[in-house]
Image (tube, rainbow, N blue to C red):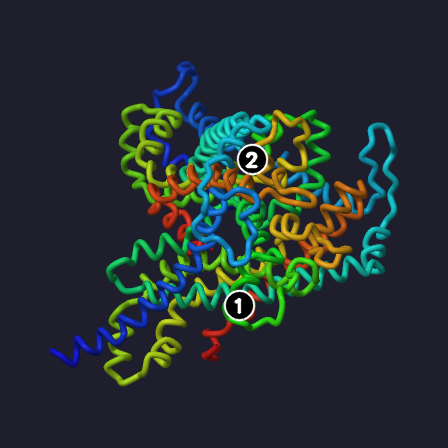
């Protein structure tokens, strides 16, 4: 029934087609029907076929591979090992460390990007001289490639680099030069600093667009009622931009768990696997140890984790204002 | 009058101070990178650091350009990015047209599958994609780069373009239809010309994604002559001692086209970003 309805609807839109087309000996009704049925598929088929082969099929394949002791070598038979790869992850201390590191990176970068991005967006909300310039400058790191900025931050956080010079020689905060990239937490901090620095411009852009859509009258009437800046922000602005807040947070959490290039280039997961995150560890298992099955299992765990986190976040955040609970 | 303008200044000055400090944090690393790219190796990690290189040398740029066929890598990146972008735009605009202008069985299902692809980060699929590329004989080839860059950009572009196509009034198309125009004609003669802004947005995003892509190229490319720019830059990073001047000269060469594109087409960046945000 719904199928017939959609076909009929499509024919209505195309109903004036009579007389067009090569099959002149068939009646108009019979001629129109196949045209309507096939035309959209012809437009969609080439792209969708490629998508199905290169994206959808690998999704299924990753799941399948995670249950095998996968052999990449030509001719060698892969062995079905059930949940072995997942059990292996469960007993692998480096896997857990990588999970904690990914989580720590996410916890360090997401709040910072949300808060700073929103703060900059609030400052740039009103039309003022230099607004476009500032917007461009804050967005600059976003468009620069991860490879370039990762190497740049490796240089800035080098033992005798600019960061140590600032903290030790100029500000005298640290007693001696910190070897940032050779300790687990200092290295994660440096990597998170890069992630935050590179990401502020993106969240700023989204918040700016959302802020433009907030009706001015609302904020003005709140001001007339005597609400101070902070209360105005909480009562008027924040609820109005909440969908953007949900979007930014969910995207940043996903992005946080997907940190890869910066870790690979700044520490390589080292020293001694101390700074592995889930994706660098997955990459190492697959392409250094050639353990494709285990690598796939790590990817599946990560996908599942990100999916669950996104759903939970959206549930919680979407409810915030419906229930009248201020954040 | 005076109290109002005094109040305005009291708000404006701190705002600009904060903005300038923030913008400086964003920009100084780049300026320092440029500065280092003009330093000789013995001056790259001195204490105190040199902010203005002394002596200034362009030797890093000549060395970067001449070493290991850097020009070739630049060309590789240009060709791969241009071909990927062109193919992706063609295929995704066709898909977007199909989704925006027709009702057919399976439409919702197919579109939801595309959205699912939008949510799965590229890195999650790199292992099965590698196995697939091996099976298809695409390892260590430009084709392997192009095909997968197109594949991974299709979902986002289709999503972006469909939204715009749906906003084009149906009446224009119906008028063409009465005149006997087929779907292909309407797509090429009406929809595409009317969609130049959104096509520009998709072009920029796809081009930059291909231009900057690193993980996939690192995984499938072995032959030195097939490297793209990100791979070449990363290889300047040494195991023990990195030649920072060389790294940043090479980086500057790779980043400058991106910055030019960004500064010229700024507004398209904003459109692309917000299309995702306001619908997602």
Q: Position of residue A319 (x, y in %)?
A: 51, 72
Mark 1 neighbour density, 10 Å: few (under 14) some (14–19) many (20 or more): some
Residue B32, placed above or below residue B58: below
Give yes or no for contact between labels 2 and 1 (Cβ–Cβ under 8 Å).
no
Q: Report in which chain the residue with disc 1 lies.
A: A
Query: Residue A278: which quarter of the image?
Result: bottom right
Q: Is residue A219 above or below residue B259?
A: below
As drawn, A261 above or below A243: above
Q: Quadrant of residue A184?
A: bottom right
Residue found 43% across the figure and 67% down from its top = A242
Assign a secondary structure to mark 1.
helix
Residue B88 in view, yes or no = yes
- Alpha carbons under labels 2 and 1: distance apart: 31 Å
> What residue does disc 1 label?
A111
Residue situated furthest front in the rendering:
B55
Q: Residue at x 70, y 64 (%)?
A: A100
């Amino acid at each position: 029934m719904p199928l017939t309805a959609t076909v009929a609807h499509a024919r209505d839109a195309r109903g004036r087609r009579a007389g067009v087309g090569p099959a002149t000996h068939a009646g108009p009704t019979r001629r129109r029907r196949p045209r309507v049925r096939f035309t959209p598929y012809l437009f969609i088929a080439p792209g969708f076929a490629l998508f199905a082969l290169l994206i959808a099929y690998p999704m299924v394949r990753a799941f399948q591979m995670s249950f095998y002791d996968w052999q990449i070598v030509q001719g060698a038979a892969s062995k079905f090992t059930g949940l072995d790869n997942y059990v292996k992850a469960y007993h692998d201390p480096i896997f857990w460390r990588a999970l904690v590191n990914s989580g720590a990176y996410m916890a360090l970068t997401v709040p910072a990007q949300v808060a700073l991005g929103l703060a900059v967006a609030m400052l740039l909300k009103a039309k003022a001289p230099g607004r476009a310039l500032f917007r461009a400058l804050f967005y600059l790191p976003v468009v620069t490639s991860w490879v370039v900025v990762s190497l740049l931050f490796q240089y800035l956080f080098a033992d005798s680099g600019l960061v140590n010079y600032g903290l030790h020689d100029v500000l005298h905060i640290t007693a001696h030069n910190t070897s940032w990239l050779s300790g687990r937490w200092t290295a994660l901090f440096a990597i998170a600093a890069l992630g935050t620095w590179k990401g502020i411009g993106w969240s700023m852009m989204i918040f700016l667009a959302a802020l433009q859509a907030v009706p001015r009258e609302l904020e003005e009437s709140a001001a007339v009622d005597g609400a101070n800046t902070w209360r105005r922000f909480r009562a008027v602005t924040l609820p109005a931009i909440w969908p953007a807040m949900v979007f930014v947070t969910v995207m940043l959490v996903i992005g946080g768990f997907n940190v890869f290039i910066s870790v690979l280039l700044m520490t390589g997961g080292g020293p001694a696997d101390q700074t592995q995150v889930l994706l660098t560890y997955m990459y190492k298992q697959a392409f250094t140890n050639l353990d494709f099955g285990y690598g796939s299992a790590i990817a599946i765990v990560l996908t599942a984790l990100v999916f669950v986190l996104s759903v939970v976040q959206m549930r919680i955040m979407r409810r915030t204002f419906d229930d009248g609970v201020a954040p | 009058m005076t109290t109002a303008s005094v109040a305005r200044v009291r708000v404006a000055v701190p705002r600009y101070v904060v903005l300038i400090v923030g913008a400086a944090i964003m920009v100084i690393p780049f300026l320092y990178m440029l500065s280092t790219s003009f330093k000789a190796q013995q001056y790259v990690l001195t204490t105190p650091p040199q902010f203005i290189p002394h002596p200034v040398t362009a030797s890093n740029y000549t060395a970067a350009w001449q070493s290991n066929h850097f020009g070739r890598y630049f060309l590789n990146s240009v060709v791969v990015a241009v071909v990927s972008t062109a193919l992706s735009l063609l295929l995704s605009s066709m898909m977007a047209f199909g989704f925006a202008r027709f009702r057919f069985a399976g439409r919702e299902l197919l579109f939801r599958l595309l959205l699912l692809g939008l949510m799965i980060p590229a890195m999650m699929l790199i292992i099965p994609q590698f196995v697939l590329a091996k099976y298809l004989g695409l390892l260590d080839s430009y084709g392997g780069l192009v095909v997968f860059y197109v594949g991974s950009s299709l979902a986002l572009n289709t999503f972006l373009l469909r939204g715009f196509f749906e906003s084009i009034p149906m009446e224009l198309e119906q008028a063409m239809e009465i005149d006997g125009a087929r779907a292909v004609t309407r797509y090429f003669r009406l929809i595409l010309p009317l969609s130049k802004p959104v096509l520009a947005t998709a072009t920029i995003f796809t081009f930059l994604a291909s231009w900057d892509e690193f993980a996939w190229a690192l995984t499938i490319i072995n032959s030195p002559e097939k490297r793209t720019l990100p791979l070449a830059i990363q290889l300047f990073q040494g195991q023990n001692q990195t030649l920072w001047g060389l790294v940043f000269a090479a980086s500057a060469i790779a980043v400058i086209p991106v910055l030019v594109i960004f500064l010229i087409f700024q507004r398209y960046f904003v459109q692309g970003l917000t299309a995702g945000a306001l619908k997602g």
